[in-house]
Amino acid sequence: MTPALRGVVLHLRSRSIPATGLVFLAAAAFTWAGYRADDPGVAQVVGLIAAVLGVASVARTLAGPDEELERGTPVRWRLVRTLHLTLLGGVLLGVLATVHAVADRPTHAVPPVGLALAVTALTGLTALSAALFGAQAAWVPPIGWALLMVATGPRPSVFEQVLTWMVQEPRTTASTATALTLAVLGTLAYALRGSRH
Amino acid sequence: MFRMLRLEAKRSVALALFLVLAALTRVFLWMDVQEWAAAWTPLLFSMRSTALTGLPAVLAAGIWHGGRERRSGVTELFAATPRSGPVRLLPAVVVLAGAAVLAVAAVTGWAAAGVSGRATFNDGQWPLGLAVGLLAVAAVALLGLGIGRLAPAPVAAPLGAVLLFLVLVLGAAGDGRPVNRLVDTVLPMLPVTDGFHRVLPALSAAQILWFTGLGVTGVLLAVAATTRTRALAAIPAAAGLGLGVLVAPAGAIAPAPGATALVCATEDARVCVTRVHSRALPDLLGPARTVLDAFAAVPGGPRRVQEDQLSWMLDADRGAPGTGDPDTVLIGLSYRTRQGGIRWKPDDVRDMVARGALVDQRCYAEGAEGWPRADAATRAVTTLLLGTSPDRLGPEARTVHDSLRALPAEERARRIGEARAAGLTCGDPMAALTGEGAVR
């Protein structure tokens, strides 16, 4: 094993990526199970909650066991953090999109753009929370907000569209802009500052 | 002990849980405040429905709190203190479950205080239902503590919350919810109900067994030290569930005859509403009398205006369309204000009663064949009898209105009477109005 590869493996292990991968697979399984319901509404809600389930496991990976120690090492941490976040979000999105593609029932699937925005924006919000409150508690804002959005459903006014950005179908400018802002802001904040400690 | 509780309250998620849960319950309970503001059963239904958002938060807080010691690596340190595990756990149990129950109880009490001033029917069974809701909150908090002690990983809390939310969403009241004893017992949310119905106490008894078992399992999980005791900890929940399903009634919601008993106006016994909606009576009285008086000259005209005693949501067996009592105008009062009055303007109430006096609307489902003709006939007659402005009538209705108006009073009343007879038996009221054909 080359030193670089060894570094990657150690990084993945220290961030409990294998367990996170299992959660991603569980999210994929729930998405698949959602298709067993013949009701398109049920399948879509299950698909969306499965995405939230996947994101719930991301927070834990945003900090190592000893941040102080890590930051002292001569590694380009901004690059590592950016790659870590985008790859993790990308893998989750890929896994879920694959399930929807294999199931091949567009009426029952979470709309692709909606799914992509949900995963990226929730991952971004997790990263933002990690930068603000630390990785341990970073799951609270994204999971809390996401579940509330599913519980209330879409709302009409522009302010409410911002509040319920995840469940606005068809997409509106306000909801898409909110999702993109969260994704970009979260990635930037985490890449620059890392998890608060 | 009190000092320990205070310490625990200050140094745990209890305060945050209290605030979050109180806010969630307030927001989600008040979302359908019009439904429950003046009746107990709807309050019970809405309060229990807040479990959808409240319980995942409670479970996450419980798991988070339960895993605290092991995450911080102080298990061995605390085990060295001269107090047994269960004793050390007691403050956490009391504080966490207490914070959750207090939050929901406070907001529910606030809502109940408002309802108690406005409710016109009280069968005394709602406190039991509300208590079961609180018991569910306590049980889930304890279960969370147990799971947290078992699985202290930081990811356990969000996963638990999302999974519980998924289960609750799939079981939320609606068309998709399966109707059986197991589902009714397990889910903290009630099956769909309204002011005309009541929740059977047997369901509450079944849920008390189940949620008590679940709470005990949570506590046992939290104090269990070995794999074997952890496995055994599942027994109370399983037993509670088994007993609960045995006790649970096949249909958890039953009609409440006391709520649907008619209350008639003292000034005019021809106008009646159900007891549970009796605050809507003053709003109905004026418009209903106007319509009854307007129809007075029509042969075979309506004699009474009554609120429909059947629920449009829950009572499937309403008899075939067109077979109702022709003397009685039945109306549904599904939109009410927070004071229990009718949310429509008096003119709209009057038009609704007039429509009900002329046709059985179940014969002419909107969009169905015959609906446009029946609708035009209804509008023409309503405008004519009530003396309102015909300017807003459609072309067909306007033509009929004008030709009816030109007729002698006696012939006009006869045709309206025939149109009414046709409209109430799923015939063609327009044909009777224009004199095209005799009554079927």
Image (cartoon, coloured by chain):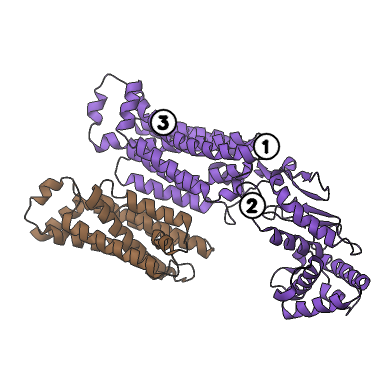
Q: Distance between the residues labelled 2 and 1?
A: 18 Å
**Which amino acid type is marked by label 1?**
Asn
Chain A color in figure: brown
User: Residue B64, percent across and down?
Assistant: 33, 40
Residue at the image position 55 percent from the left and 34 percent from the top? B131
In what element is the residue under mark 3? helix
Q: Is residue A16 visible?
A: no
In what element is the residue under mark 2? loop
Spot the residue most to the top.
B82
The chain letter corresponding to purple is B
**Which amino acid type is marked by label 3?**
Val
Residue holding disc 1:
B122
- Check disc 1: other Cα within 10 Å, few if <14, some if 14-19, many if 20+: some
Asked if A117 appears above or below B165 in the picture, the reply is below
Asked if B140 appears above or below A134 in the picture, the reply is above
Same chain for mark 2 and mark 3? The answer is: yes
In what element is the residue under mark 1? loop
Residue holding disc 2:
B336
Asked if B169 appears above or below B362 in the picture, the reply is above
Q: Which of marks 3 and 1 is in front?
A: 1
Residue holding disc 3:
B219
Q: Which of marks 2 and 3 is in front?
A: 2
Pointer 2 or 1: first along the chain: 1
Q: Nearer the viewer, mark 2 or mark 1?
A: 2
User: Residue A66, percent across and down?
Assistant: 15, 45
